[in-house]
Image (tube, grey):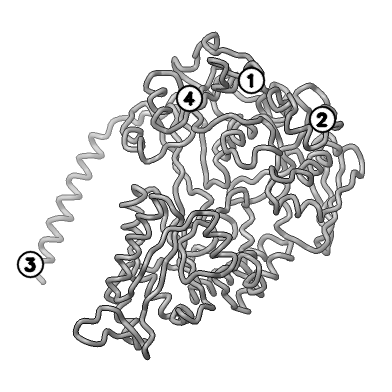
Amino acid sequence: MKKLRWQLLIIFLTGLVVGILLISEQPENTPVIAPEPEQGGVYVEALVGGFQRLNPVLGFYNSSDQDVDRLIYSSLITFKELGIPQGDLAESWFVSQDGTIYNFSLRPDAKWQDGQPVVSEDIIFTINMLREGDGVVPEDIRKFWQEIDVKELSEDTIQFSLPEPFAPFLDYLSFGILPSHLLGGLSFVDLIDSSFNMQPVGSGPYRFGGLVVEDNQIKGVVLNANETYYGGAPFIDQIVFRYFDSSASAYAALKAGQVQGISSVDRSVLPDVLIDPQLSLFSAREPRLTMILFNLKNADVAFFQDREIRKAFMEGLNRQKIIDRVLGGQAIIADGPILPDTWAYYDGLKTIPFNSESAIETLKNNGYVVSGEQETVRSKEGLPLSFELLYPDDEEHRKIAELIQLDWEKLGAAVEIRAVAYQDLIQNHLETRDFQAVLVDQNLANTPDPDPYPFWDQVQATGGQDYSQWDNAVASDYLEQARVTPDLNARALLYRNFQIVFDEELPALPLFYPVYNYAISKQVNGVQIGPLFNSSDRFMTITKWFLTGPQKNVPTQTIIVGTPEVK
């Protein structure tokens, strides 16, 4: 002990002397001066995807169109930090005490890019298009709006009447608004083929400038700053999107000096992007959760009904290894069913660490043992720990399923994995509850309000999306209360309680949240990216972006603007 104390004293005295010398030789403070925002310039982004139509009602299944639409159009409500709703076209709103009436007042300074004011009729027209969009608009959105009564109270005031209280209602108001004064006479069928989709007029920060056409093919879109935008004119004068079929081809264009940003950096180019000194890489949690669902009502795999067995399977699963080997490290380990970095997420949940020895001990303690000298599969009272794991039929999910299989076989389980086509997996296995265990991705895009009710409430176990058929009255009560409680703080507490119950029971195994990567030139300033609900959320602060350096003066005359010939 004395020797150790002397070592500590020597270390302390040495540190003191070094500290004094460093202070005495410390150079004068050099202030770091951040660049001041400058007006002007052109930003060109490589957009991985293709062009279809620039119309928010028609773009639900094309993320590239959604990215461009985000800059052209506005919505009543937008969602910013932590997924908290904020007014966009809506200046204010009022909710009745029973939660069934929503009155919205529009901003008086909101104008279409042709100078006409944004009015209540524009919102009503757009909602009617959503109601009529059979086969184009997602069915759940169509049905939702068919049950909502929408009334114009005045030119700048609109009322929504709900059949019952529904706290996540604001989620459904983030759609882009169309101009009724230009489209009001069209049916939905007419809207699909309207020339408006090639020459759109919106009320967002950027106005349509033209199409980039090469060899009679649409290769890009040109947008010009909307100087009358109610949110303040953007600093960047022009944004050009050019379409590429992959991250690799987009990165090649960037290295050739043709673009300044890449909309989506996948693992094929990520290593190169990470070491590129000219680029800034922004990463954000995607609105997607990969998890394993157990069929809790299937008698052939009755062991899944035991939460201790479910926890053993979680503990015996090396999730970080899956993330590193299959996803190149581009995912975040998930601890629960609600997206992190949102107002509803409870950060008190504990991560279950990988520990196969502890998992095996849990199985033994619960009666699952290996019997016989040649046996490798654990069983209890004649029921072997044997089951089938289904997974979507693609390369990435196959690799994930194989690693899961290896981990669980080390525990003494016999796991057969089987690939199933995506639609078949949903229609013939999940919806019919014909499975034992399944690897799935829960897509939570465009839903900043968590509302886990459809996936975990006991009422949804039959005919709904509670595919595991988890029947927990306490958890369901929290979910049902949160759906009808308008106060955000009260809802957060209810969801906290729900997550604690989920964590204790573990009816399914949350694996990870994938990560989205966005690359942009370091000469583009003011970029901020938080957790995403849609890839277009990267433009949340677009009016604050500005350019510095030589790339500020990308020549616009190299851009070919035109319209493809109709044949």
On the image, the x and y values in percent for residue 226 come to 68, 23
**Badge 2 vs badge 1, beta-carbon distance below 8 Å:** no
Sequence-wise first label, 3 or 4 = 3
**Badge 3 vs badge 1, beta-carbon distance below 8 Å:** no
Q: Residue at x 75, y 37 (%)?
A: 177
Please give left or right for residue 160 compared with residue 223 in the image.
right
**Viewer-proximal residue, 365 or 18?**
365
Sequence-wise first label, 2 or 4 = 4
Q: Secondary structure at mark 4?
A: loop
Look at mark 3 in the image and give the residue it sits on.
3
- Which one is in front in this view, the residue at disc 2 or the one at disc 4? 2
The correct choice, above or below, for 389 with respect to 471 in the image is above
Please give left or right for residue 232 compared with residue 467 in the image.
right
The correct choice, above or below, for 199 with respect to 165 in the image is above
Query: How far is disc 2 from disc 1 in space, using C-alphas?
Result: 22 Å
Q: Secondary structure at mark 3?
A: helix
Look at mark 1 in the image and give the residue it sits on.
224
Look at mark 4 in the image and give the residue it sits on.
35
**Viewer-proximal residue, 551 or 168?**
168
Q: Residue at x 66, y 68 (%)?
A: 463
Sequence-wise first label, 3 or 1 = 3
Quarter of the rendering containing residue 320: bottom left
Look at mark 2 in the image and give the residue it sits on.
183
* Quadrant holding the C terminus: top right
Q: Secondary structure at mark 1?
A: strand
Q: Which amino acid is tagged 4?
A: Pro
On the image, the x and y values in percent for residue 102 come to 82, 53
Query: How far is disc 3 from disc 1 in space, using C-alphas?
Result: 73 Å
